[in-house]
Image (cartoon, helix red, strand yellow):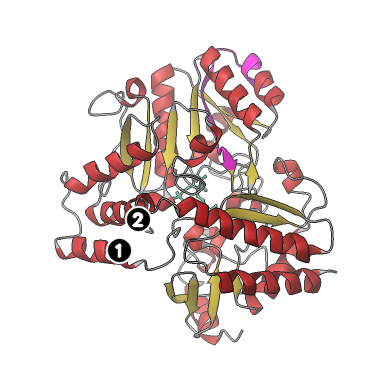
Amino acid sequence: METPNSKRLFADAIKHMPGGVNSPVRAFKSVGGDPIYMESAQGSQLVDVDGNEYIDYIGSWGPMILGHAHPEVTAAITAAAIKGTSFGTNSEGEVELAKLVKKFVPAVEIIRMVNSGTEATMSAMRLARGYTSRNRIIKFEGCYHGHGDSFLSKAGSGVATLGLPDSPGVTPSTAADTLNAVYNDIGSVRAIVEQNHGEIAAVFIEPIAGNMGCVPADSAFLQDLRDICTAEGIVLIFDEVMTGFRVSAGGAQGLYGTTPDLTTFGKIIGGGLPVGAYGGRREIMELIAPAGPVYQAGTLSGNPLAMAAGIATLSAIDADPEFYKKLEQKGRAIEDGIRQAAGEPLTFNRVGSMFTLFFSEEPVTDFSSAKTSDAARFARFFNALLEAGVYFPPSQFEACFISVAHSESDIEQTISAITDAIAKSRG
Ligand code: KE4
């Protein structure tokens, strides 16, 4: 691919923004080369500023489950924008989106809209501490819950991609209140709970991790986690920012049948506009101001344009009884194609329309096993795919996303490109 305009723009951007980007995962730090600038997108296709076309498997890191520029979403945003972009008051869309989320996720009795997944997890953490009068939280190595101070400890996503130990700027006292367990290892959770008896406010987990690459939780592990939290009065928080409305209408909790006390959302519920949310048991959520004393606020929370985009997205999902069956068929086709193409023992994890190909010969069930992947080989694989017009996340520690707009020919072209890229990436 010739990308002179992307190179020109990045050379300019680097003078004005840290690393030339507004989010580290978009940089090509771990795969080499300069990041690509996109001009437009439609359905499964991205078009860069040099006119190159790509089949997109980032999907804006999850939100674009309908495909880019879905007409109903674009129309809803346009209609809302004509009426004003933000009122700073209540508006009808907030009520409609809240009710739509509750329709899909029964564990959510009360919900608060915010502007990002990070805001959702930060707020849920403060709420859990306020509800329990306890300070410590448990998270899992390799999981990423946004860039809130308490979560930047052994985190996944960009933190793992850049090989950052944790993050300067997080105070030792804050870091001391975050305890990391091992994903899919209930013994590691029991040990931490015993060592910190009566001190743990919440357990945060991605019920299907996407930020160490795609790593599903074992169902027995997740239920054991539920049982421990119930017995210990610990708030169990499913971070479904990525999995909410991605893996089923009811998210991961709908697939596993394990019910958290609180759930965080983002990405798909905003349809590509900035939306996050947290919700769950009424007795906990009603501690949030102004109903209760735990403070959380936001100038643009419940913004009418973002609500309109979220409503249009969830309504389109709700209107199609075959929606997740279609995504599963596309995911299965890609999985079958990759397994046939690999010709060597690589690890492929998938849940519905989210997947990761690991350049590792061993099963990937936690952060340690995810890190056995050959990152250098992934970089060669990523660039070979990009050259072939297939755009994967520029990191081994991310998930790929399929939309309902990905066609059979997209998938055939993708499998062919992956087959070649696996061969080309061999040392
Ligand atoms: P945001 O603040 O980026 O909206 O959401 C944070 C977040 C919270 N929880 C989970 C499970 C998440 O996956 C995320 C954000 N995901 C990354 C990609 N893995 C966002 C991409 C980026 O950082 O630019």
Q: How crowded is mark 1: few (under 14 residues within 10 Å), some or many (20 or more)?
A: some
User: Nearest the camera: 120 or 164?
Assistant: 120
Choose top left, top right, bottom left or bottom right for residue 265.
top left
Q: Which of the marked residues, 1 or 2, is nearer the chain's N terminus?
A: 1
Relative vertical location of residue 406 with respect to residue 264 in this rendering, above or below: below
> Could you tell me the amino acid type at mark 1?
Glu
| Tag 1 and tag 2, C-beta contact below 8 Å | yes
Q: Give the range drawn in magenta.
A: 192-208
Relative vertical location of residue 385 with respect to residue 249 in this rendering, above or below: below
Q: Name the residue under label 2.
A: 316
Is 30 positioned to the left or the right of 46 in the image? right
Q: Distance between the residues labelled 1 and 2?
A: 8 Å
Q: Residues within 10 Å of mark 2 (few under 14, many from 20)?
A: some
Q: Mark 1 points at which residue?
A: 72
> Could you tell me the amino acid type at mark 2?
Ala
Choose top left, top right, bottom left or bottom right for residue 387.
bottom right
User: Nearest the camera: 96 or 180?
Assistant: 96
Relative vertical location of residue 105 with respect to residue 269 in this rendering, above or below: above
Instruction: Where is residue 267? Give x, y as percent.
Output: 43, 52
At x 32%, y 68%, the residue is 71
Q: Look at the image and say whether residue 212 sits in the magenta stretch.
A: no
